[in-house]
Image (cartoon, helix red, strand yellow):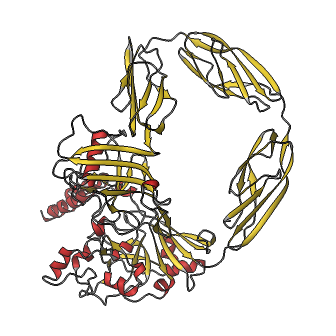
């Protein structure tokens, strides 16, 4: 090997070794589920799962790995002006000649893939009147009528699930190769449009193509802009055929957690019927019934009981009758027994006792042997002094009582001197303000001094203080304990929630905002630099000031430059349940998932004195890929958590009155260029130079 070649090999090895691991972590989907649903949109009539290698080997392949396919993105005013100076703005771009709106993330790459009709054929194909839905692993879904997929206009072209990209598209980092290597956005759906509608002879599914080929209800928008690229879902995981076929008539069946026991006997019933019943009628055999799917019933009389379950769906009704499903025996006098999680240790020793008595006691009387006692089935007792202790338990029900005594059950040793180990507990962690919380020091190694920080500006030096939270908020609690040998501190973020009419007030106060931009990173790994004087900037300032996390969504950024708030602290977007965040600026609702967005919280400018309000609530019902408003929609009654801010240039006197939420801000510096991008280029460049030499 020549010296030049040897040097080139070393450089390449270094380049590969330094490739960022995160690139592999963002690999695309590799398997596809094809499934046919009944008219209830739940019952599976037929399904199969294939991976892209099988698809490549067994089904017709679309694309050649060299030809690029495009979806047109939003035609922004500046793009239009560049292509049509002085002409009246038309966001639909009928001539399909606004190149900026095509290349800005609309270039889907030199893709190859499998047609959706060929995939549907694996389970018998779709029929006239069916709907075909493409679902991605992040929950995104787009549903199309039968004719759009099976009889596509040439301007639209066939719908293809792409599993290969021949080269990197310029508009958006997608990767090349296959989904399990570097094709980061595979498998990705694309319409293989013809070349008839644009001056360059490109395969573009344009915004005007979408308008001409589809009914208005299927048009896609990014904010107020038509955007065909918004229907190119990535990370495709399922092709669903939604039919009008009735599901099969259900077959009723159930199971129970117990089949026998002594009075009183609580039995948990679990429906295991087939074909997705919609209604349930239980007859427990003792004159009681229920319409719940999985009820729990308590039998109070001894006997053998026949249980009947009747279920129904849109196709019909079925029943199952199980004689002697539950046998209930009469109560007996308990036989007392107990267990402990520890039998020895240094003082102070906390021991958790657990009742293990037979005969279903209803009352418990504990004697811990040190002059202390307790009631209840599972007490925790702290032994403060060294010694050996005898523990007794008396278990009682309406039939009688029994006592067990265990001599020398617990041995408490003399503690070895050491700095304290901080810990604490409380009797309650949530309630409508004002509410009272009793804190208990559970620290080890005998602290002699205590310093409590309740998170609302109040403190205490008592070992077991009682504190009243008078204002709504989410509070972080800290305890520092000290003895002659040292100190220790424990902090519990978001430990206390003082609610307001059942709503968590995560922050309420004045927020000072400076000028300029800040950096934030989305879960996708992409970093953004919004302006500080926006609702998003205000939220970031609060996060830094009060130490809570937030999460942004950037799924629509490529087409509209809009970001969304997907989470604050533990209150995260739950798309499947319809729970989401919304933003108000001076009382105006900026964005929600039920309609196209306006400025959104990363673009609307704010001024001193403005109010910015974020609500998290159960506002929508997620169905067939859409967020439909729940009863009442975006309203205070449906709200679960609130962040309320007033914008100011300087901090208010005494600081903001704010709910503390703990943890660090989500803000992050903009990432540097990853080594995986520039090292291979450097290696190739150096090789060419050396070759020249």
Give how far across and how far down residue 375 sits, in percent: 66, 24
Question: Which residue is nearer to you in this view: 152 or 142?
Answer: 142
| Quadrant location, the C terminus | bottom left
159 left or right, relative to 589: right
Question: Which residue is nearer to you in this view: 519 or 464?
Answer: 464
Query: Vertically, is 30 above or below 101?
Result: above
Question: Which residue is nearer to you in this view: 522 or 103?
Answer: 522
| Quadrant location, the N terminus | bottom left
Q: Is residue 172 visible?
A: no
Give how far across and how far down residue 397 sits, in percent: 78, 29
Query: Vertically, is 436 above or below 593?
Result: above
Q: Quadrant of residue 597?
A: bottom left
Query: Vertically, is 429 above or below 111?
Result: above
101 left or right, relative to 579: left
Q: Quadrant of residue 682?
A: bottom left
Identified at 57% across, 9% down, the residue is 386
Q: Is residue 11 visible?
A: yes
Please tell me how many numbered marks the rendered image carries. 0
Give how far across and how far down residue 48 sits, in percent: 59, 71
Give how far across and how far down residue 329 sits, in percent: 85, 39
């Amino acid at each position: 090997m020549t010296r030049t070649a040897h040097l080139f090999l070393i450089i390449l090895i270094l380049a590969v070794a330094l490739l960022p691991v995160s690139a592999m972590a963002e690999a695309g989907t590799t398997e596809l589920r094809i499934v046919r649903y009944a008219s209830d949109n739940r019952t599976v009539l037929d399904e199969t799962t294939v991976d892209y290698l099988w698809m490549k080997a067994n089904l017709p392949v679309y694309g050649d790995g060299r030809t690029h396919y495009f979806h047109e993105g939003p035609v922004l005013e500046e793009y239009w002006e560049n292509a049509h100076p002085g002409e009246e703005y038309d966001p639909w771009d009928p001539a399909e000649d606004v190149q900026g709106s095509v290349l800005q993330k609309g270039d889907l790459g030199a893709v190859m893939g499998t047609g959706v009709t060929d995939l549907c054929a694996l389970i018998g194909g779709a029929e006239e009147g069916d709907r075909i839905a493409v679902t991605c692993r992040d929950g995104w879904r787009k549903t199309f009528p039968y004719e759009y997929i099976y009889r596509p206009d040439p301007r639209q072209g066939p719908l293809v699930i792409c599993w290969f990209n021949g080269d990197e598209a310029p508009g958006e980092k997608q990767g090349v190769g296959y989904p399990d290597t570097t094709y980061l956005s595979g498998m990705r759906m694309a319409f293989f449009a013809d070349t008839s509608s644009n001056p360059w002879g490109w395969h573009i599914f344009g915004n005007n193509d979408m308008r001409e080929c589809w009914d208005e209800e299927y048009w896609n928008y990014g904010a107020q802009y038509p955007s065909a690229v918004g229907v190119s879902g990535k990370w495709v995981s399922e092709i669903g055929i939604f039919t009008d076929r009735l599901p099969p008539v259900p077959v009723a069946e159930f199971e129970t957690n117990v089949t026998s026991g002594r009075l009183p006997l609580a039995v948990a019933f679990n429906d295991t019927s087939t074909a997705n019943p919609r209604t349930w009628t239980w007859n427990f055999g003792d004159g009681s019934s229920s319409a719940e799917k999985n009820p729990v019933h308590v039998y109070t009389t001894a006997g053998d009981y026949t249980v009947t379950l009747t279920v129904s769906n849109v196709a019909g009704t079925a029943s199952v009758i199980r004689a002697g499903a539950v046998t209930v025996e009469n109560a007996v006098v308990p036989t007392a027994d107990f267990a402990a999680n520890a039998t020895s240790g240094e003082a102070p020793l906390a021991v958790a006792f657990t009742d293990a008595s037979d005969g279903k006691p209803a009352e418990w009387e504990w004697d811990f042997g040190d002059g202390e006692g307790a009631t209840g089935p599972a007490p925790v007792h702290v032994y403060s002094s060294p010694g050996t202790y005898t523990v007794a338990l008396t278990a009682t029900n309406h039939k009688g009582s029994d006592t067990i005594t265990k001599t020398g059950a617990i041995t408490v040793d003399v503690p070895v001197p050491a700095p304290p180990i901080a810990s604490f507990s409380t009797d309650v962690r949530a309630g409508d303000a004002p509410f009272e919380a009793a804190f208990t020091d559970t620290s080890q190694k005998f602290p002699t001094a205590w310093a409590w920080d309740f998170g609302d500006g109040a403190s205490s030096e008592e070992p077991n203080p009682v504190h009243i939270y008078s204002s709504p908020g989410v509070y972080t609690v800290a305890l520092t304990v000290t003895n002659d040998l040292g100190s220790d501190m424990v902090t519990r973020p978001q430990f206390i929630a003082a609610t307001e009419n059942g709503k968590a007030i995560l922050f309420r106060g004045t927020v000072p905002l400076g000028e300029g931009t800040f950096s934030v990173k989305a879960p996708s790994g992409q970093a953004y630099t919004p302006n500080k004087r926006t609702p998003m900037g205000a939220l970031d300032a609060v996060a830094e000031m009060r130490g809570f996390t937030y999460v942004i969504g950037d799924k629509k950024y490529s087409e509209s430059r809009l970001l969304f708030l997907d989470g604050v602290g533990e209150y995260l977007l739950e798309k499947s349940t319809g729970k989401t965040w919304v933003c108000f600026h001076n009382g105006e609702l900026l964005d929600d998932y039920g309609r196209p967005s306006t400025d959104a919280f990363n673009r609307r400018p704010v001024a001193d004195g403005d109010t910015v309000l974020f609500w998290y609530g159960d506002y929508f019902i997620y169905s067939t890929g859409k967020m439909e408003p729940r009863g009442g929609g975006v309203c205070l009654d449906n709200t679960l958590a609130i962040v309320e801010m007033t914008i100011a240039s300087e901090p208010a006197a005494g600081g903001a009155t704010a709910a503390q939420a703990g943890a660090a801000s989500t803000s992050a510096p903009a990432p540097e260029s990853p080594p995986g991008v520039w090292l291979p280029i450097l290696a190739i460049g150096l090789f060419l130079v050396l070759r020249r030499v």
